[in-house]
Amino acid sequence: MCGIVGALSTSPVNQLIYDALLLLQHRGQDAAGIVTMQGTKCYMHKARGMVRDVFRTRNMRGLPGLVGLGQCRYPTAGSAYSEEEAQPFYVNAPYGIVLVHNGNLTNAQALKEQLFDVDRRHINTESDTEVLINVLAHELELVARDLPLTPEHVFRAVGAVHKRIKGSYAVIALIAGHGLLAFRDPFGIRPLCLGEAVGQGSRDSGREFMVASESVALEGTGHRLLRDVAPGEALFIDLAGQLHSRQCAEAPSLNPCIFEYVYLARPDSVLDGISVYHARLNLGETLAQRVISTMPPSDIDVVIPIPESSRPSAMQLAHRLGKPYREGFVKNRYVGRTFIMPGQGVRKKSVRQKLNAIGMEFKGRNVLLVDDSIVRGTTSQEIVQMAREAGARKVYLASAAPPVRHPNVYGIDMPTKEELIAHGRSIEDIRVFIGADRLIYQDVDAMKRVVAALNPAIHGFEASCFDGVYITGDVTAADFAALQAQRKLQLDNDDDGAAAGAGDGSNRSRLALQSGEDNQ
C-alpha cells in the first residue's frame, strides 16, 4: 500500500505534487519522494519520513518543471530502513524513465532472474518497483529502437509488461522529453484515477491533468475527477497536454481490493465509482443484522467506535439498532498508527499512547465496540482491556470486516498466516484471546454484496485475506513459504535498522517517523 501521484501543469508542479502527497499520507508514512522534469532533465528528492519532514523549502526549490510524479511509501517488499528503496526509481535508458508504483509483484524474484540472465539488466535492491521499472524500460527499448517514440510504442510496451509481470500494480512513470505514463494491472486491484484541472479548456488547447491513487488527491488540489483508469488500461499524456489512452491487456476484469473500502482509503474518496464513506455505511448496516442475529440488542447500552475508520460503520450500526452512538476514545494524533508497525511489542506498547478512554461513556454500561477489522488481535485485546478498566460492565466487539484468515500478497501488510489472529482459530478462540464478552464478525458474502451494490459494473473483488481466493491465479504454497522467509528477513533487518538509528537523527525509529497520521 502506497500513495502515488503524477501531474502535468502549465505552472511549476512541485507544490502541486507535494500537496497531493499530503492528501495521500495515510497510504504510506515510511518514505516519500518527488521527481520533476524540465526539458529532458529530471530532478529528484526522496528520503525516509513523512512528507512534511522529507521536503523543506530548499528541496522544493530544487524541483523545477511542469510535469512530475511523487510517492509516499509503505513497504510490503524490501526494507523500511533502506533509503535506497524509497521511490521514485530511475533508469537512464532508454530515454530516461522515472517510476512510482503501488502494489506488489508476485513474480518479482523470477523476473529479477530473467532481467539478469536474459535482458542483461542488474537489480540492486530488494524492491519489486526496481524490477518493474527495468521490465518497462526493456520493453520500451524493444518496441521503439531507432524510432521516434510515439503513444503507439508506449502502449505496445505496456502490453508486453502486462504479459510478463503478475500481481497488483498501479504505476505512474515519466519518460524524459516525452510525457507522463500511467497504467493499472489487468485485474484493477490497486486504485488509480484521472483528474483534470478545474476551468481548463478544450482537448485541442492542451489540458492540465493529474493521476493519483485516490480521488481525494485530485479534489484537494483543484482537479475534478474524470474517471478511474480501467484495469489493464494505459494513459499517456504528452508534454503538450494531449491525453492518449489504450486498453493494453488481453482479458481485463475489474476486481478492486475490498480492503480499500474497509480500511485503507480515506472516506471522502471515490474508488472505481464507489464512495468509500457510503461503502462503510453499508457495512455498518449489514453488521447490525449480524449483531441482531447473534445477541439481543437490549443487552447493548451504547455503541462506541474504535477510531477512526470504523466511525461510519459504527454510526449506521447504532442507528439500525436504535442505540446511542458515543465517542468513547480520544486519539493522540501524534503517534503513528499501530497497523503498520513492524513488531508486536512496539504495536502493543503504542496502543495506550495512542488511545485514551473517556470513563463516563463506559462506567456501568454494556458497550459494543466497533472496529473496521481485526488483523493481528493484539490491539483489540488492549482496547477491550482499556474499556474494562474504564468501568464497562460488559464489552462486546464487532468487526465491520470478516475474519482475516489468509495472507495478502497484493500490497497489504498481511504477509504470513502466523501473524493473523483468525488463521486456524474459531471465533470463540479469538474472543477468548481478545477478552471480549461477545465477538461478532461481518459475513464475507454480505460484505461483497453491499459494497458491490454501489456500482453494478463491479462483479467481483480481490478479497483474498478474507476468502483465500487469489485472483491472479499464480500464487502457490511455495510463494507463501518465500514470503514468510522474506518477512522474517525484513523484520530482522528493520529491527537492526531501528537499533542502529537509536542515536542517529537520520535513522529515527519507525514510530517516530509515523508521527501524527492515521487512516483518516
Image: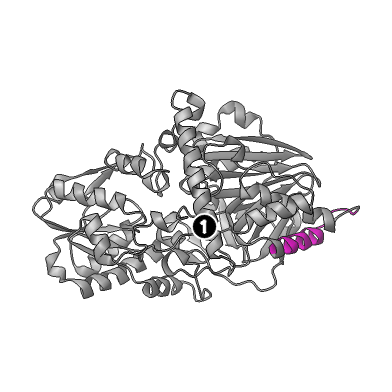
Q: Is residue 466 above or below residue 507?
A: below
Image check: 147 left or right of 440?
right
Is 406 contained in the magenta span? no
Q: Which residue is mark 1?
A: 481
Q: How is the image coloured?
A: one colour
Image check: 303 left or right of 146?
left
Residue at 34% in and 51% down? 308
Question: Which image quarter: residue 170?
Answer: bottom right
The 10 Å Cα crowd at callout 1, few under 14, some 14 to 19, many 20 or more, is few
Image check: 308 left or right of 269?
left
Q: In what element is the residue under mark 1?
A: helix
| Residue that extends furthest to the left in the rendered view of this protein | 364
Residue at 46% in and 67% down? 463
Q: Is residue 477 above or below residue 129?
A: below
Q: Position of residue 108 (x, y in %)?
A: 63, 54
- Residue 96 seen: yes
Residue type for callout 1: Ala
- Residue 240 seen: no
Q: Nearer the viewer, residue 237 or 513?
A: 513
Q: Position of residue 45 (x, y in %)?
A: 63, 34
Q: Nearer the viewer, residue 354 or 283?
A: 354
Q: Position of residue 497 (x, y in %)?
A: 49, 33
Provide the residue span drawn in magenta: 147-162
Q: Please, what is the dominant secondary structure of the magenta stretch?
A: helix
Q: Position of residue 220 (x, y in %)?
A: 51, 48
Q: Nearer the viewer, residue 300 or 112?
A: 112
Count the marks: 1
| Residue that extends furthest to the top in the rendered view of this protein | 503
Q: Is residue 291 above or below residue 509?
A: below
| Residue that extends furthest to the right in the rendered view of this protein | 146
